[in-house]
Image (cartoon, rainbow, N blue to C red):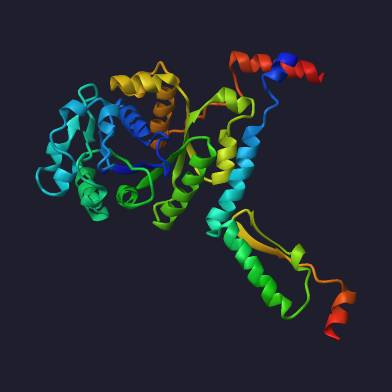
Amino acid sequence: MKFFQKAGIGRSRSAKSAKERLQLVLIHDRAGISPGKLDTLKDDLINVISRHIEIESDAVEITLTKERDQHRLVADIPLAPARKRRHSTS
Amino acid sequence: MSATIVTITSGKGGVGKTTATANIGVALASTGERVVCIDADIGLRNLDVIMGLENRIVYDFVDVVEGRCKLRQAMIRDKRLNTLFLIPAAQTRDKTAVSPQDMVRLTDELRQEYDWVLIDSPAGIERGFRNAIAPADQVLIITNPEVSAVRDADRIIGLIEAEEKGPGKLILNRVKPEMVRRGDMLGTEDVLDVLAIELIGIVPEDESVIVATNQGIPVAMETNNKAGRAFHNIARRLKGEEVPFADLGGGDGFFGRISRMMRAGGES
């Protein structure tokens, strides 16, 4: 048994990481937006939204997802704590 | 009678387009179908050597396009299978010598007298690729179970759909069942899952292909090798037959059986 484990049989999973990397890269390829462009979009988004409401800009997450055939741009934008917001707008 | 025009393409180079074109051509012709294989890789002629017809070239596809010879004069008949023909690519010109309209016009000339026209596309997504898919009734996308090849296949699938030549069908080439079995190579399911496309063939990695290329005798000329059988299955599926897919990854093999027994033993 040890021999087979050492030989990597039934234990090595590089195909799994190949598939995961492919799925990620294809989401960007298909949407035609590179991870770098997505970062620029994120910065723009933070600027625009910050003009209207105070947000936790460090915690903003923009991701591309795919469910069946629908590609989706998902923005998770946490607001600044309520106390801080009241303080800053007063 | 009207030929079906099938283009074999991939995006990435070196995944087996030319080998697949030659062997699907051989497999179809071996059942009596009349087949013309066109090398659309202008400037990088290769289908002739894979088919073993390189010594018989007089005219090429660009000679036909530019009117220096009749289409029939550029067609080389295979002496082993007398319903198989090759139209070679020009070696000294580039892809701009041919337009998509030329491809449509010349393949239309072949439709009446043949059953199949197979077009070996060049790699890439530029003019040569567009020439190759312009006349296609059906497009076969060939890939290897590797991240870069599958990524390029996805891009090609998108372009084929944009040109309204889709949906294409997939050939998964150079699969190593033992590596799939131990989780170190993308399996058929993985690739289909990622690309969401219909499968038309799985070709195992087979040293016979290299021997065949050395000799200029396509593997599908014989049926005593795995890759050759896989290409015959693809030909049958093209003709509309239901042929079950070989299990390359979960199935048989002495070593696979042993390692599964050992694992089963370890788990109990």
Q: In which image quadrant can residue A48 be found? A: bottom right
B12 sits left or right of B109 in the view? right
Figure check: B225 above or below B142: above
Q: Residue furthest left?
A: B68
Residue beneath the point at 42% across and 45% down = B11
Q: Say above or below: A72 vs B35.
A: below
The answer to whether residue B260 of the structure is visible from this angle is no
Q: Nearer the viewer, residue A42 or B197?
A: A42
Q: Identify the residue at horizontal 65%, vertical 36% (top origin).
A: A16
Picture quadrant where residue B120 is located: top left
Q: Residue at x 10, y 43 (%)?
A: B69
Residue B33 at x, y percent in the picture:
28, 31
Please count the marks in the image.
0
Relative to B170, A4 lies left or right: right
Q: Work out whether B56 lies above or below A35.
A: above
Q: Position of residue B209 (x, y in %)?
A: 39, 23
Q: Is residue B132 visible?
A: yes
Q: Nearer the viewer, residue A48 or B120?
A: A48
Query: Relative to residue A89, is residue A26 drawn left or right?
Result: left
Specify the quadrant that holds the N terminus of chain B: top left
Q: Give the x, y percent position of residue A54.
A: 78, 76
Residue B24: where, in percent of width, then height? 35, 31
Q: Residue furthest bottom?
A: A90
Question: Which image quarter is the C terminus of chain B in?
Answer: top right
- Residue at 36%, 23% in the rendered image: B220
